Image: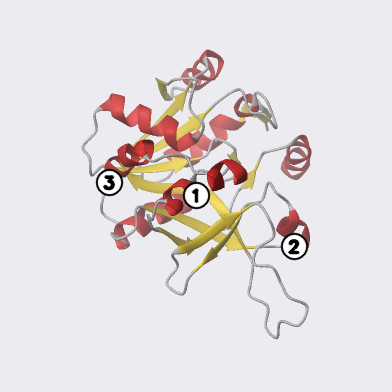
Amino acid sequence: MKQQFLVVIPARYASKRLPGKPLLEFDGRPLLQHVYQAAVNSKAAEVIIATDDARIARAAQGFDARVVMTSTSHQSGTERIAEAVTGLQLPAATLIVNVQGDELGLAPALIDQVAGNLVQHPDAAMASLYAPLRSAQELHNPNCVKVVTDARGYALTFSRAAIPWRAPDAPTPAPGYRHIGIYAYSCDFLETYTTLPVSALEQTERLEQLRALYHGYRIHLEQAAAAPGMEINTPEDVARATYLLR
């Protein structure tokens, strides 16, 4: 994948499920630093942290990250990134990878993969990744987002619910996949995204990618080429991650 790309990590302090999440320490370093280092180890030309909180900014500057301050009014990481790249005045075609600030143990290769996926599918507005569901617990966990694609890998829908639903008499149940919360898009599409009306579907599921799908934009997904990291969403996730690191 020859085209250069930038990584922007959206990070906010006021998480409803786990306040202060980016600054929680794992193995002696804040979660945000783990994510930042994974991005630095990718092929990204630059890594930027976009935040609305001075505490996160100070922590990021403590490990020499570049920080862009944004508004406190954003409803999603994509909106926050859109403001950040607008302020940087990047060319419209610049490729941006959104690496969520809560992905502990994310493989740098997945960052490179999602950037390459968008380049290889110019008819898509966004690119992302998925991995097979590992258990019934994941299937029914609302913090584990599920995705269904068509035969060519374009997203049909995303949901926190268990999809696809498996009829008891289904001869060959369709496989289930979890969405990995990493996106690639151009600065041009980011600008477009912020002009799209928020749909009831996006608000119901609390999934930002559904805004793009609802308005007819395509999202292409590939199966992750490496094991995905662990999303830190709840106190239970923190306890599990701490145990695994030990």
Spatial CA distance of label 2 from label 1 is: 25 Å
Up the image or down, 188 lies above or below 59; here it is below
- Whichever of labels 3 and 2 marks the residue nearer the N terminus, that label is 3
**Can residue 212 be seen in this snapshot?**
yes
x and y, in percent, of residue 59 in the image: 54, 19
Relative placement, left or right, of 68 versus 90 is right
Quadrant placement of the C terminus: top right
Indicate which disc residue 210 carries.
1
x and y, in percent, of residue 209 in the image: 48, 48
Q: Residue at x 46, y 61 (%)?
A: 221
Name the residue carrying label 2: 135
x and y, in percent, of residue 3 in the image: 26, 51
Type of amino acid at the residue the image marks with label 2: Ser
Nearer to the camera, 205 or 19: 205
Q: Residue at x 50, y 35 (%)?
A: 76
Secondary structure under tag 2 reads loop
Relative placement, left or right, of 7 versus 204 is left
Q: Residue at x 64, y 44 (%)?
A: 231
Spatial CA distance of label 3 from label 2 is: 36 Å
Q: How many marks?
A: 3
Name the residue carrying label 3: 4
Nearer to the camera, 35 or 126: 126
Type of amino acid at the residue the image marks with label 1: Leu
x and y, in percent, of residue 194 in the image: 37, 36
Up the image or down, 121 lies above or below 78; here it is below
Mark 1 nearby-residue class (10 Å; few <14, some 14–19, many ≥20): many
Which mark is nearer the camera, 1 or 3? 1
Q: Residue at x 78, y 78 (%)?
A: 168
